[in-house]
Amino acid sequence: MGGAEEFARILATRGVEQGLIGPHEVPRLWDRHLLNCAVVSELIGDRCETLVDIGSGAGLPGIVLAMVRPEINVTLLEPIERRCRFLSECVAELGLANACVLRGRAEDVVLRADVATARAVAPLDRLAELVIGMVRPGGMVLAIKGRTAADELKKARPVLRQLAPAAPWLYARGKVRSFLRLPSCGSSLDKAGHRWGSAITGRVQSPPARRG
């Protein structure tokens, strides 16, 4: 818990000063950002060994996932130098031995992970193109979305169909999954008094076995 509190302090000070977090987000850092990134770890399987957080920015969800899942090696992928410096400082100060920062763009980096995460990076149709080569066959793409998740998935279907013929092992299906969020965020309450967020998950299919 101490690491999370320190990360919250960093976000509320240097994160705001460097333009990574808006000042109006400070009062809701815990419920809207930190805790809602932490619960996403429930969608990641126990066999995951490597994870890449695309467009990591302020480290949400990458740094949070590195804290709650210390058994996973997390790569924080970010193209902007000043953000990379911020992320490197966070990794060092929080003592995250399982996290590293890599400067680069998703479309340029040679990297294969078990899971790729993305939060507020791009619409799913664009994101699908970015993650083509970043997830191993059998791995998972986890795009953290809001209430528009189902609409984004529907819109992205044509792009996914176009990608599949060129590389049939790429994920060509997605599923909208829900995760529990805190009461101050998201959509309306359910009967139990819970709010739910949405994430789009897609499995990367293994290449079909060749005959003959």
Image (cartoon, rainbow, N blue to C red):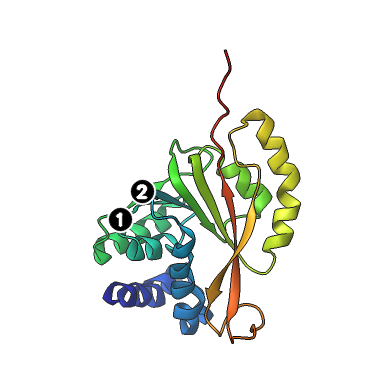
Q: Horizontal and vertical percent for residue 174?
A: 64, 51
Tag 2 near tag 1, CB within 8 Å = yes
| In this rendering, position of residue 170 left or right of residue 3 | right
Q: Give residue 49's mark.
A: 2
Residue 71: assigned label: 1
Q: Position of residue 49 (x, y in %)?
A: 36, 48
Q: Label 2: state its secondary structure.
A: loop
Q: State the image coordinates of residue 29 (x, y, percent, origin top left).
A: 46, 78
In the image, 5 versus 163, the foreground residue is: 163
**Amino acid on which disc 1 is placed:** Glu
| Figure label count | 2
Q: Quadrant of residue 44?
A: bottom left
Quadrant containing the N terminus in the rendered view:
bottom left
Give the residue drawn at x 65%, y 78%: 187
Q: Is residue 2 above or below residue 153?
A: below
Amino acid under disc 2: Glu
Q: Is residue 202 left or right of residue 77?
A: right
Residue in front for this viewpoint, 155 or 176: 176
Residue found 57% across the figure and 44% down from its top: 130
Residue at the image point whose x is 58% and y is 28% from the top: 208
Q: Residue at x 67, y 82 (%)?
A: 188
Left-right relation of 10 to 204: left
